Amino acid sequence: MKLHELRPAKGATHREKRLGRGEASGKGGTSTKGNKGGQSRAGYQRKNAHEGGQMPIQRRLPKRGFKNPFRVEYKVFNLGQIDHLIEKYELTEISHESLREWGLAGQTDKIKILGNGELKSKVAFKVSAISEKAKQAVEAAGGSVEIVK
């Protein structure tokens, strides 16, 4: 067998349907698209939430609630989690850069520390926000807190 003699196995390939090429193609006239209407025309595109004339779900359901466009989202860490992270990654400072380095925070995340759990080690914090309870616990453990924007 030579490279130029290679062929696909018998029955593995099919002839392409040649739509819109007259009656002799066996798919003539309407080219298998039915008669008239948008779907038989070029450039037809089904609308995203179209339900065939039925009232769409986004119009059947009532509007509810309020979405505050000025809400500030924080990536939240509790003191118990921080203590675990300090042991695992041998951190001396909790800041946006150090958390990002270990893949614990995204580039645009704001960091907030909450007071749930215990902090056993002395650590410096450079974060966007911290709760009062967490701040007292950090200072009691000998650490420092700096709020950065």
Image (spheres, rainbow, N blue to C red):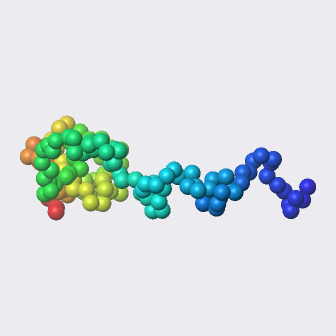
Q: Quadrant of residue 19?
A: bottom right
Quadrant placement of the N terminus: bottom right
Measured as percent of width and height from the top left, residue 28 is found at: 62, 56
- Determine the residue located farthest toward the right in the rendered image: 1
Measured as percent of width and height from the top left, residue 39 is found at: 45, 54
Q: Closer to the camera, 95 or 36? A: 36
Q: Residue at x 17, y 38 (%)?
A: 116
- Determine the residue located farthest toward the top in the rendered image: 117
Q: Residue at x 82, y 55 (%)?
A: 7
Q: Residue at x 69, y 57 (%)?
A: 24
Q: Closer to the camera, 8 or 139? A: 8
Camera sees residue 33 = yes
* Vertical relation: 136 (above or below) 99: above
* Vertical relation: 107 (above or below) 143: below
Q: Closer to the camera, 39 or 120? A: 39
Q: Closer to the camera, 116 or 37? A: 37
